[in-house]
Amino acid sequence: MLQDLYREIILDHYAHPRNRGKLEGADIAVEGVNPSCGDEISLYARVRDGRLEEVRFEGRGCSISQASASMMTEAVKGKSLDAAHELAEEFKAMMHGQVPDEGRLGDLVALQGVRRFPVRIKCATLAWVALQQGLREYAAGRPARVVASSEDEL
Ligand code: ZN
């Protein structure tokens, strides 16, 4: 069953988060909060030559929020800042009902099942909203460390 496969992917990322930890001297550092569920993540990234050379996160909260953060770090690591922003847009569009392009979203499509539980959508989008906020701050030349909330998702 596809749903079982999706659940396995999510639980695997929750149990064994990828790119977890703090990044010293990060160019991008964002605190993401999802008040409706109590999820928190700290997202860090190092930018080199217009690419996300390193991406890490720390956090606590429900399995969806933490698995999504883990999957996000894997998906955007090595990507250009523009490509990372576009992927975030695509991911959010999927979470809001658009049919995903599996070629581009890969394993991230596992999270689309969360759409059946509207209250959890903000858990899944938290890391991505934080990423986009961090990219905006970086592009504006503002210092790292900002707070983003998936409550006011753009
Ligand atoms: Zn949550």
Image (tube, rainbow, N blue to C red):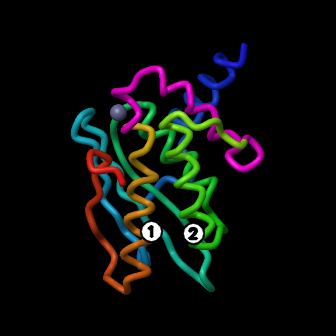
- Mark closest to the chain's N terminus, 1 or 2: 1
Q: Nearer the viewer, mark 1 or mark 2?
A: 2
- Residue 110 on image: x %, y %: 62, 31
Q: Main secondary structure of the magenta part?
A: helix
- Residue 76 on image: x %, y %: 61, 60
Q: Is residue 116 left or right of residue 140?
A: right
Q: Which quarter of the rendered image does ligand 1 occupy?
A: top left
Residue 23's tag is 1
Give the extent of the magenta segment. Answer: 102-122
Q: Residue furthest top?
A: 1
Q: Residue furthest front?
A: 98
Q: CA distance from mark 1 to mark 2?
A: 8 Å
Q: Amino acid at mark 1?
A: Leu
Q: Does the magenta run of residues contain 118?
A: yes
Residues at discs 1 and 2 in contact (Cβ within 8 Å):
yes
- Residue 126 on image: x %, y %: 39, 47
Residue 54's tag is 2
Q: Residue at x 58, y 61 (%)?
A: 86
Q: Quadrant of residue 131?
A: bottom left
Q: Residue at x 43, y 65 (%)?
A: 44
Q: Quadrant of the C terminus?
A: bottom left
Q: Residue at x 53, y 55 (%)?
A: 88
Q: Is residue 147 left or right of residue 126?
A: left
